[in-house]
Image: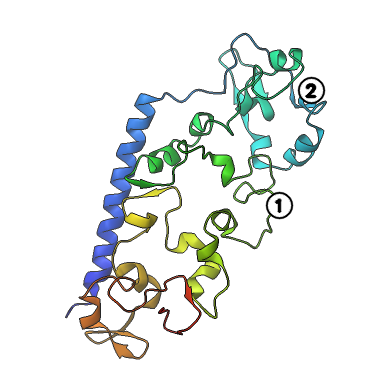
Amino acid sequence: MKNPGIFSKKVCGLALAGMILLLLFACHAMKQEPIHPVAVVPGAEYIGMESCALCHAATVKDFKFARHAKLTVTLPDGQEVLGCESCHGAGSLHMAAGGGKGKAIINPGENPATCYQCHPEVQAFFSLQYHHPTGEQGITCNDCHSPHGENIMLPKGTLMGQQSAPCDQCHQEQSKPFVFEHEALREGCTMCHSHHGSINDKLLVASDANLCLRCHAEVMGDQIELGGGSHNSRLAQGPCWSSGCHTAIHGSNINAHLRY
């Protein structure tokens, strides 16, 4: 612990290793599942977003302001597909069948494969050892994202300022108010967690005290100072949240030092 710079070197090393690993997973995913230019419904023709609006008026009204609405895909024959059919596939057969869930239409809300066509890097994260069970246990991208909403990063109906709103839906115990809060939660769960997948347990962006030192490191000479006292010997015992010190990492109702 005589050289505090070892922490920053270790963080850089872990980050580089993680990036290389993700690149390898992404290349593997693309070889296994070729990226198609658009969702395909065999035998169907493209009818345009205005035709979709005849039955899905409310969805299309909001969707016009979404980033996905601006997605334009050019087919091999030069035809351009804009909006709904870029993700759901050509809609003529669906419309001829009178609509209805699952009738001659692709529903990315049931299978994330369509999302992976444009987001192979996210699929790579889901291939890591620790990952959110998307595509498993009935969980899909739509459980955390609003593909038709103006802000795709938030589930429908949540406030713009709630950075952790997608996480709060399932992790209510961790996101509830505490008497003594962990200020990092104000910035959102992704300050500490890699939300799609990670090489670390609990989806952490780092597996040791480097996670905490990104915000809390105060170097005084050859000492790691935290809270006005040296932590050199304490950091050697293990991660801050598992070495018997700050176990209430999300917040505490009884102790200002985040302890139970």
From the viewer's perspective, is residue 46 above or below residue 213? above
Q: Residue furthest top?
A: 43
Q: Position of residue 173 (x, y in %)?
A: 52, 64
Few, some or many residues within 10 Å of mark 1 (<14, 14–19, 20+): few
Find out whether the residues at labels 2 and 1 contact each other: C-beta distance under 8 Å.
no
Instruction: Report which quarter residue 45 is drawn in.
Output: top right
| Marker disc for residue 51 | 2
Q: Nearer the viewer, mark 2 or mark 1?
A: 1
Q: Residue furthest left?
A: 2
Residue at the spot of label 1? 157
Q: Position of residue 48 (x, y in %)?
A: 74, 22
Which of marks 1 and 2 precedes in the sequence?
Answer: 2
Q: How many marks?
A: 2
Q: Is residue 92 visible?
A: yes
Identity of the amino acid at label 2? Answer: Ser
Q: Secondary structure at mark 1?
A: loop
Q: Residue at x 42, y 74 (%)?
A: 248
Instruction: Report which quarter residue 81 is drawn in.
Output: top right
Q: Where does the C terminus fall, quadrant-wise?
A: bottom left
Q: Position of residue 244 (x, y in %)?
A: 30, 77
Q: Secondary structure at mark 2?
A: helix
